[in-house]
């Protein structure tokens, strides 16, 4: 009897979430100060954060295709990644901002950003996305300073 099938082991491994860290949007709001010089957060009807226009509006960025804000002149690398199916989630967004050029594999218009509380920042941005999965997994809450 061959009970242990590698595929089962593989699927078990995938069942464990790779990004178990839950961010705190309130803390993330402070982190966003360092993004504001270049990015606003504004819906059609409301300005949530007044910010610079060097970067695209980040309203609803989580769950949105990369490089897809109409009228914004992105680097071609980012637009291509979006066209090829890249959709921002909390994990890939953090990877991107840490080193945009490396992430898109060519020159980016955005310089690398150092953030202290990445998951919090990502959770904050996610709070501006419709149907965002703000699954209240409060158990993961931590005060780390
Ligand atoms: C110095 C200006 C500047 C700062 C500061 C900055 N960005 Fe950007 N950001 C840009 C530019 C310019 C782009 C467009 C990049 C491109 O076209 O390659 C961009 C693109 C992005 C994108 C991709 C958006 C999309 O529509 O695909 C995300 C996400 C993003 N920035 C998040 C952040 C976050 C979070 C911070 C703060 C930690 C931040 N940025 C700080 C200039 C900036």
Image: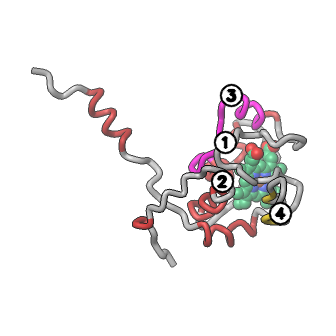
- In whole angstroms, how far apart are the C-alphas of marks 2 and 1? 9 Å
Looking at the image, residue 13 sits to the left or right of residue 28; the answer is: left
Q: Where residue 117 sits: x, y (%)? A: 59, 66
Q: Please rate how many residues cluster around mark 2, counting C-alpha atoms within 10 Å: few if below 14, some from 14 to 19, many from 20.
A: some
Question: Residue 99 or 88: which is nearer the viewer?
Answer: 88
Residue named by callout 3 = 84
Question: Residue 139 or 36: which is nearer the viewer?
Answer: 139
Residue named by callout 1 = 103
Residues marked 2 and 4 touching at CB (< 8 Å):
no
Closer to the observer: label 3 or label 2?
Answer: 3
**What segment is highlighted magenta in the picture?**
77-92
| Circle on res. 69 | none
- In whole angstroms, how far apart are the C-alphas of marks 4 and 3? 30 Å
Residue drawn at (65%, 49%) of the image:
62
Q: Residue furthest top?
A: 1
| Circle on res. 98 | 2
Vertical order, 107 against 38 (above or below): above
| Circle on res. 47 | 4
Q: Please rate how many residues cluster around mark 4, counting C-alpha atoms within 10 Å: few if below 14, some from 14 to 19, many from 20.
A: few
- In whole angstroms, how far apart are the C-alphas of marks 4 and 1? 29 Å
Q: Earlier in the sequence, mark 2 or mark 1?
A: 2
Closer to the observer: label 1 or label 3?
Answer: 3
Residue 121 lies in quadrant = bottom right
Q: Earlier in the sequence, mark 1 or mark 3?
A: 3
**Is residue 110 visible in this depiction of the protein?**
no
Residue drawn at (88%, 54%) of the image:
54
Q: Where residue 49 sits: x, y (%)? A: 80, 65
Closer to the observer: label 4 or label 3?
Answer: 4
Residue drawn at (47%, 59%) of the image:
21
Closer to the observer: label 2 or label 4?
Answer: 4
Q: Earlier in the sequence, mark 4 or mark 1?
A: 4
């Amino acid at each position: 009897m061959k009970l242990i099938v590698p595929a089962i082991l593989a699927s078990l491994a995938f069942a464990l979430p790779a990004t178990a860290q839950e961010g705190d949007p309130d803390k993330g709001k402070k982190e966003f100060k360092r993004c504001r010089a270049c990015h606003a957060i504004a819906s059609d009807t409301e300005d949530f954060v007044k910010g610079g226009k060097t970067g695209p509006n980040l309203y609803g960025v989580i769950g949105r295709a990369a490089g897809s804000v109409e009228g914004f002149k992105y680097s071609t690398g980012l637009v291509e990644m979006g066209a090829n199916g890249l959709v921002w989630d909390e994990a890939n967004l953090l990877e991107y901002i840490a080193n945009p050029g490396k992430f898109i594999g060519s020159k980016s218009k955005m310089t690398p950003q150092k953030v202290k509380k990445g998951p919090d920042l990502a959770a904050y941005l996610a709070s501006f996305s419709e149907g965002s999965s703000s699954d209240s997994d409060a158990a993961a809450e931590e005060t780390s300073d």
